[in-house]
Image: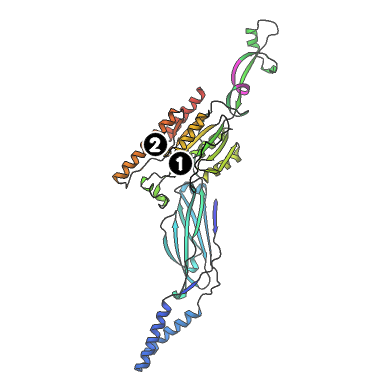
Amino acid sequence: MSTTEHRGPDWLPSWTLSGAIPAAAVVAVAFSAAGLVFSRVDLVLIALPLIASIALAWGRRPQADAPSFFSATVGGGADGHESGMLRYTIGIEPPDAAEQVQLRLAVLSGTGSEYTIAASAAGSIAGRVPIVHSGPQELLRAQYRLIGHDAAFFSSVSQPHQVRRAIAPAFTPIDSLPLPPVLHGLTGTHDSKRPGDGGEFRDIHPFTPGDRLRRIDWKATARRAQTPGELYVRRTTATADATVLLVADSRDDVGENVASWSSWSSASSALSGRTSMDIARTAASSIAAGYIRAGDRVGFQDLASSARVIQHGGGSRHLARVLRAIELTGPSGPPLHRVRAPLVVPGALIYVLSTFLDDEAGRMATLWRAAGHRVIAVDVLPVAKLNRLQKEEVLAHRIIMMERADRIRSLTSYGIDVLAWDQSDRPATRAAVLRTISRQAAAR
């Protein structure tokens, strides 16, 4: 089980006298004065408990140098993905002068709820966080303040404690693997067009210097030989690996609930529903795992950032690096505008994962296609839900979708294959499209 642990820094709370002590002091003085003026002993006796409580509270006032500690642990793994929940535990270690803890806890960037907890029970606050999205995200945000004995003193509010974690997407490696027109690798699991060892039957060819004797086909020699010493060999194709580049467009992250598009930055992540980056992470992980397990070399780039780049490689360790890079991919700061497309290994197959809501990703795809690469555009826009939209918003969404459809048709006209990836609704259709694209590659 993997855990994410957050330990807050030492916090020295600044304590403030509550209104109860001054109010009790005013009442005690008033009763004492009234008892003296009217010679009423009972009024003075009423003031005595108030004076005693004030003295007791002042004697138990919190020390300014007593620190408070905050810790949070989020645990989960494969079992967490199956249940769709992550368990968390929050621990607060208040100083001895605190009697209660007021806690404000927000889950998944929500509005948050407030709790008042006894100081003795503040070290065992537990709950569950639903797994709504993959990728980097804020799971918990907590603030708290301390309340002294009898609420005579209360502290300032602590700084916000954020618990962030990158959630790995659930994925299944793809089975049908489209290939580039030309395989440049020297070894692998795919049949190349050049003669060599390891592949399927290629042809029967006259023996030439360099051919191995064990490849002589005596039956073919007996049928075809015209002169003594003429030999024929049985040739096979060489095996090769494919070079695949995954390009993720993380410049935007839109949810299936269209109502959240206009206020994405302030909306709760639970209200947006499944987002385009959720689908992109699942698609990229499935594609990377499928190719690397087949012995191919895979690289990864983020179209919105030049820092997230994984060079081409193969093997289980490289797959772990690629999956980790995909897991950490998300919108971060102003998008990067590229003047020209990033350099790509010659003969690579390029997957461009984008919503294609603007021209940038399509422009990069067409530049790569013009350079001779085979490009597959993976559409990661989720199926839209138009609930809670006004008529004007529905019309605006329809116009945006029409412009997007024009971009996708333009990609098709350039010879770019388009694959609409859907995480849950149409897996059979996606598999059929992949098989069709794979057969097209074999026929070229």
Q: Toward the viewer: 320 or 334? A: 334
Contact check, label 2 and label 1, Cβ < 8 Å: no
Magenta span: predominant SS is: strand
Q: Which residue is mark 1?
A: 279
For disc 2, the neighbor class at 10 Å (few under 14, some 14 to 19, many from 20) is some
Q: At x 68% / y 5%, what residue is drawn?
A: 227
- Which residues fall within the magenta stretch? 194-203
Q: Amino acid at mark 2?
A: Arg
The mark closer to the camera, 2 or 1, is: 2
Q: Going by the picture, which residue comes out furthest to the left?
A: 391
Q: Which residue is mark 2?
A: 404
Asked if 368 appears above or below 135 in the picture, the reply is above
Marks 2/1: CA–CA distance: 18 Å
Whether residue 175 is visible to the viewer of this picture, yes or no, is: no
Q: Earlier in the sequence, mark 2 or mark 1?
A: 1
Q: Toward the viewer: 308 or 339? A: 339
Whether residue 107 is visible to the viewer of this picture, yes or no, is: yes
Q: Amino acid at mark 1?
A: Ile
| Residue 166 among magenta residues | no
Judge left or right: residue 366 versus residue 182. left
Q: Toward the viewer: 341 or 163? A: 341
